[in-house]
Image (tube, helix red, strand yellow):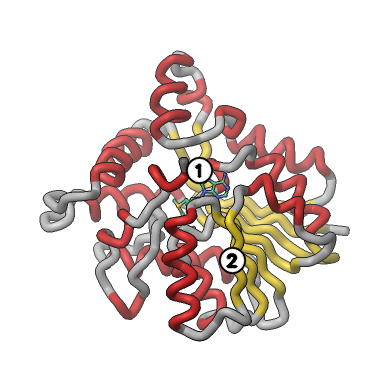
Amino acid sequence: MYENFFGLDELKLNDEEKYGLSWANLGYWHGNHSYSKAGRNLAIELGKSLELSKKDRLLDVGFGLGEQLLLWHSYFDIDSIVGLNPSEIQNEYAKSRISKEKLAKKISLFTGTSADISRFNSKKFDKIIALDCAYHFETRIKFIRDSIDLLGDGGALGMIDLFPTEKMLKWPQKIMNSLITKFFHIDKKNLMTIRDFELEINEMDVFEAEIIDISNYIFPGFCNYINKEGVKNQSGLKKMKITAKLLSFFHRKDYVRAFKIILKKNI
Ligand SMILES: C[S@@+](CC[C@H](N)C(=O)[O-])C[C@H]1O[C@@H](n2cnc3c(N)ncnc32)[C@H](O)[C@@H]1O
């Protein structure tokens, strides 16, 4: 089921080998550069804010085609990485990259959804990451609650995530159901404003939260890239082209925003 939507199409978007050829996120854009650079920038942006370092035991949920798993090791020097992702086809692809790089002892992969993280042992990780994917989880809030037990003392959770604005939540339910839930595979319970999300986090009384709006570094760059000659005429990118069209409209109308979220466990 996950394979239909989360496959290998994104490989066609990647375009600059030195930055990695299997990113599958919206990217973090500083003007007009390659998609690969933007994909890597987004991972580095989150990794730096999460203060990833050599001593960390890391859990990465929703790792896509696995480019980020290699980055956590090469850029942040991390030797203990566990990845969890529901798409078998993506996981096979990531596994083959990892074994080619001879990193199988440092990076272990599991097939499963965010709901499966509760199977890991208590305090097993120092950092947990969800890079451009927690809006798909069932649910984002359950994932965060389950993370609390998995994180060691002083551990932290980092996410790049999308939230609807109040304006969007007023749309008729029919449109929400067909467009957001069905097309984008987003659980309805994740449709909350960033303000309501922050209130829920504060109520947990476990995290110190840092939430930064990064919308302007995400949506215009991604949408312009997909509309470039040479990209827009390429076959096999239907999902990305529709996504770019919708996101461009949503951003212009302020219906959706993108955030970098760091939740540091204060106990
Ligand atoms: C937009 S892609 C991001 C991939 C990757 N993080 C990256 O930055 O290249 C979304 C990812 O979320 C994963 N995903 C979807 N539903 C999920 C769930 N319920 N639990 C965990 N991961 C999920 C998909 O398999 C896919 O790899």
Crowding around mark 1 (Cα neighbors within 10 Å: few <14, some 14 to 19, many 20+) is many
Q: Position of residue 99 (x, y in %)?
A: 49, 79
- Report the amino acid beneath label 1: Leu
Q: Which mark is residue 162?
A: 1
Q: CA distance from mark 2 to mark 1?
A: 25 Å
- Report the amino acid beneath label 2: Leu
Earlier-in-chain disc, 2 versus 1: 2
Q: Position of residue 246 (x, y in %)?
A: 31, 35
Visible residue check, residue 130? no
Helix, strand or loop at label 1? It is strand
User: Which is more foreground, mark 2 or mark 1?
Assistant: 2
190 vs 29, left or right, is right
Q: Which mark is residue 180?
A: none
For the point 49% across and 70% down, the residue is 95
126 vs 224, left or right, is right
Residue 95 to residue 101: above or below = above
For the point 16% across and 50% down, the residue is 235
CB of mark 2 within 8 Å of CB of mark 1?
A: no
Q: Position of residue 137 (x, y in %)?
A: 59, 42
Helix, strand or loop at label 2? It is strand
Residue 116 to residue 47: above or below = above
Crowding around mark 2 (Cα neighbors within 10 Å: few <14, some 14 to 19, many 20+) is many
Q: Position of residue 32 (x, y in %)?
A: 25, 63
Mark 2 = which residue?
Answer: 109
Q: Nearer the viewer, residue 72 or 8?
A: 8
For the point 58% across and 71% down, the residue is 48
Q: Nearer the viewer, residue 79 or 202?
A: 79
Q: Nearer the viewer, residue 111 or 171?
A: 111
Residue 143 to residue 200: above or below = below
